[in-house]
Image (tube, rainbow, N blue to C red):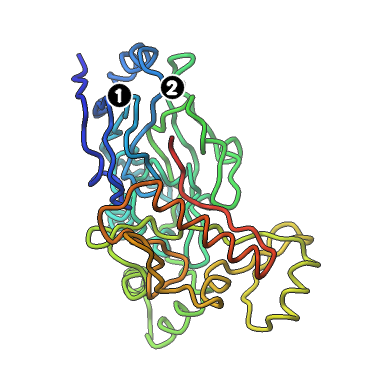
Amino acid sequence: MLNILENIDLTLLNTLHLKSIASHYIVLNQVEQLDEIREIISNYPKFFILGGGSNLIIPARYQGLVIHNELRGITITDFGQEKIVTAMAGENWDDFVAYCNQNGAFGLENLSLIPGTVGASPIQNIGAYGVEVKDFIKEVVVYDLQTGQLVSLNNSECQFSYRNSFLKNNSRFIVISVSFSLLTEPCLNANYGDVAQRLSSLTHPTPYDLRNIIIRIRQSKLPDPNKLGNAGSFFHNPIIPKKVAQKLCIQNPNLPIFTTPNPEKIKVSAGWLIDSLGLKGLRQGNVGIYQEHALVMVNYGGAYQTELLKFADWVQSKIKEHYDVQLNIEPIILD
């Protein structure tokens, strides 16, 4: 029988540290609890699945049921040139990357130190330093709350796109586990500028070296959410028509741009747009833009969702007014 708790403080369970109270809260730590959860959610006006809380903008009071996914466990199977590593959704993401690295399963090193859980990785299609998690996901097992069945989704069924997937904003499914197809022989991804420069100073760099380089780069640019509330990148890099991007580049020659799978679309740097207007380091009340990285919004302490979103809206309006580019918020906004 699940223990349903009332009026639980979520402030330390979201990496933005937004002040929040959940009217009802349960912990999911056994697959056998899923059928009971399916039965009880009908008693609540709404619910959401909480993992590491690293990609959420939560309200001051969540009037519904919070299901905290703390399923644990990792298995690894060797298939010659690849290893299939399966992790339960509640595993800490960076601990999982370290586990893979230590057990000769390579490919995820560029995604080191990203906050959150394994279960969130396919939902958001996390990415950093030239790598997206979709390139390594073999299968995602989910629990279908409509049918009460466990369902296996292959890579194509997840419908991955830039920081998005079939599972994002889809409350029908609870992620149970994620299986990754990883390499047994190192193949270091050094396409990103800072990474390539640091690796080049090493004679025979290893995946362990790459992971440590990524960690040091992230620590130098991004705040530790345990010390300063944040959700990492707060805005998507805008993907805009190629003609619009070309015009922007003529006006702003230093604007970083990136190709996309669609030849008629170009991705531009949201951080550069924000920084170019002198907004990096700006603070309004309890919230602001991190002084070392213009793409990171921070909570200096005591902020609520409304204050953060009001500031974000102000930043968006400034970018729209100056560049005619719409910035979209990356974390999921709960009401």
Image quarter in which the N terminus is found: top left
The residue carrying mark 1 is 31
Residue 37, picture quadrant: top left
Which residue occupies the foreground of this view, 243 or 138? 243
Answer few, some or many: residues within 10 Å of disc 2's Cα (few below 14, many 20 plus, some between 14 and 19): some
**Mark 2 and 1 residues: CB-CB less than 8 Å, in contact?**
yes
- At 43% from the left and 22% from the top, the residue drawn is 150
> Alpha-carbon distance for marks 2 and 1?
10 Å
- At 33% from the left and 54% from the top, the residue drawn is 115
**Kind of residue at badge 2:** Leu
Find numbered disc 2 in the image and state the secondary structure of the residue it sits on. strand
Left/right placement of residue 15 relative to residue 295 reads: left
- At 34% from the left and 41% from the top, the residue drawn is 87
The residue carrying mark 2 is 150
**Kind of residue at badge 1:** Val
Vertical arrangement, residue 293 with respect to residue 154, above or below: below
Vertical arrangement, residue 145 with respect to residue 51, above or below: above
**Residue 14 location, x and y as percent?**
30, 46
Residue 326, picture quadrant: bottom right
**Residue 94 location, x and y as percent?**
31, 55
Find numbered disc 1 in the image and state the secondary structure of the residue it sits on. helix
**Residue 317 location, x and y as percent?**
59, 60
Which residue occupies the foreground of this view, 116 or 19? 19
